[in-house]
Every structure is written in C-alpha cells, then in structure tokens.
Amino acid sequence: MGILSQDIKALFTDQLENWPQAKANYEALKNVKSKDFDFGKYSIRVQFNPARIQSSAAKVDAKSIQERKCFLCPANLPSEQKGAPFGSAYQVLVNPFPIFPEHFTIPTYQHTDQLILDRFGDMLDLAREIDDNTIFYNGPKCGASAPDHAHFQAGVKVFFPIEKDINRISKETIYSKEGITVYAITEYLRNFFLLQASDKDQAVSFFKQLYTMLDMKDDDKEPMMNIVAWYEQNEWYIAVFPRAKHRPDCFYAEGDDNLLISPASVDLGGVFITPLEKDFLKITEKDIETILKEICIDDTKMQSIIQEIKKIQ
C-alpha cells in the first residue's frame, strides 16, 4: 500500500516541528485530566480535553455542512499540514485536535460521502499496514465531524481499553468459519459484534452480510455504526457497534441536566471525551451507563440480529 508505521512516525515528527498549532495541541495533551469508573471486569475512562470542543459540538446538519469549506479536502488544508499517501485514494494527516498522543486522520483525496460499505477492506489494510495504531470509523451520524468526506482515523495502540477488555469480558460465539470467528458482546454496557479474522476476504464478506441486517433510517445513506479495528499476531480484531441514535438526550438538555458528550468510536472503545470541565467534574457512573444504553441498539434488537447471523451457512 506504500506506507508503513515508520513513515507516519516520520510525518508526525515533521509536523510537530513545523506546525505550531499541532505542536501546541499535542503539548496540551500532557495536561488532559482523566479519571476511571470501575464496572467490574472493565472500566471506562473519562477525559477532560478542551481541544475536542470543535468535534464534540460540530454542527453536522446538511445546511451547516453546505455552508462551510470541507476541512479534509486537499485544497482546504492549512498550508502547514502535510500528508503521506496511503495507496492512491487516501492520505494520512496528523490530526491537529488530538485525543491520542499520536492521532491521525486518513481522508480520501476525493470529496465523497463518509460511507463504509465499499471501504471496509481499506480499513483492514490500514490496520495491517500501520499495526501499532488502532483504526476507527465514525459513521456520518455517529460522531464524524466531516460526514461529507470519507475518512478513517488512527490512534496509537493501548489507548483504547477495549483492546484489553475483549480478553476479559463474556463473549458468545455466533458464527465461525475457517479464517473468521464472530462474537456477540452483550455484557459491556454497549451491545456490539466482534469479528476476529485471519482472512481478509472472509471478514469483508461477513461484514457485508451484517451490514444488511442493520436498520437504516429513511433519510440515511447507511446504517448507523462505529467501527474500531486493530491487527495483532496476524489477525484482525474488528468491533462493530450498531447505533440507535446520534447524540444522547443529555447533549440537548438544559441547565444541570446538560452534558456536552457526542459519543463516537473513542467513547465506545472505553474513553469518554468531555470538552467542558463542568461535565468532567459532574459525570457519574450512572450517566455513562445511560448514555451508552441510549445510543447503542437495545437488547431486543441485538438478539434479533444474533438470530439472523446464526442462520448464515
């Protein structure tokens, strides 16, 4: 594909040397506050990261999107922002508003909608090629602040609690074939499917079947979902989180009930991002549980999909 982990490390180093805004924001990460909430076999970390206000509060309605320049199109990038090509369709960019100590955005050169179905294989290629990073995808109504421009993101491994949690939490095997095993996870506050695959074609084939089982709302172009993927010891681990809604009720609430939290892949992977200190200070274990249950598909829908998957031969 033409890029390796050392290539993007070199890009990262160069950008921090030559792009003052990026350097300042990565320096600011050292002051990010965090606290952990214990849920038994796993915990959820909450971070106060004020630089993420642009993403968390992003207006992603059609009118707002049309009225702003796309910040992922090559012509609109800051003059200091440089990229490294990934194949012929994508470039890797240092994300100037980081969550991770090393945080990348991987947009297409072409301005095209954020849709995963025909790009899922590209996501797996990325996970394998830059395997010291975890790759994630936010659907157009699931945390993507650029729903009009196809892109993935990458963050340095070990940041996501889910990478370790999957070894500890309960998993039900619901599909198995040479090269792939699929698990249902229903005891993790958020229902999701875990694909563990050594065969890329099998993973892509199964994902396309799962995609057809997810509900699509009338005005949407794809089912709502977030995906987190990483590559380890010659296998892909792919967590697919079907979504029920974009933002929780607390995002729109007034007064003390308001929590400015717009969950995306990072939150579902186990790190809640709060761009406002008031929310970081007041968020509770119950808030986290309520938000996750609200935005992810419920147990009834999850069981319905599980039964469909079990019928696949």
Image: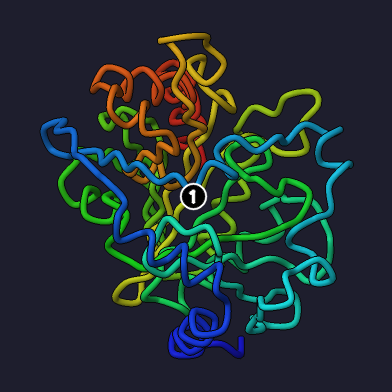
Whether residue 313 is visible to the viewer of this picture, yes or no, is: no
Looking at the image, residue 292 lies above or below residue 143: above
Position of residue 234 measured from the top left corner of the image (x, y, whole percent): 35, 76
Q: Please state which of residues 41 and 233 is positioned toward the viewer in this rendering.
A: 41
Amino acid on which the number 1 mark rests in the picture:
Ala
Q: Residue at x 28, y 28 (%)?
A: 281
| Percent x, y of residue 230 | 40, 64
Q: Position of residue 148 (x, y in %)?
A: 78, 49
Residue identifier under label 1: 51
* Residue in the image at 50% along x and 83% along y: 8
Q: Residue at x 35, y 38 (%)?
A: 184
Residue at x 16% of width, y 30% of height = 39
The quarter of the displayed image where residue 81 is located: bottom right
- In the rendered structure, the answer to whether residue 90 lies left or right of residue 201 reads right
Please state if 284 lies on the left or on the right of 144 as rendered: left
Against 68, residue 188 (above or below) is above
- Residue 152 rendering spot, x and y as whole percentages: 59, 60
Q: How many marks?
A: 1
Q: Residues within 10 Å of mark 1 (few under 14, many from 20)?
A: many
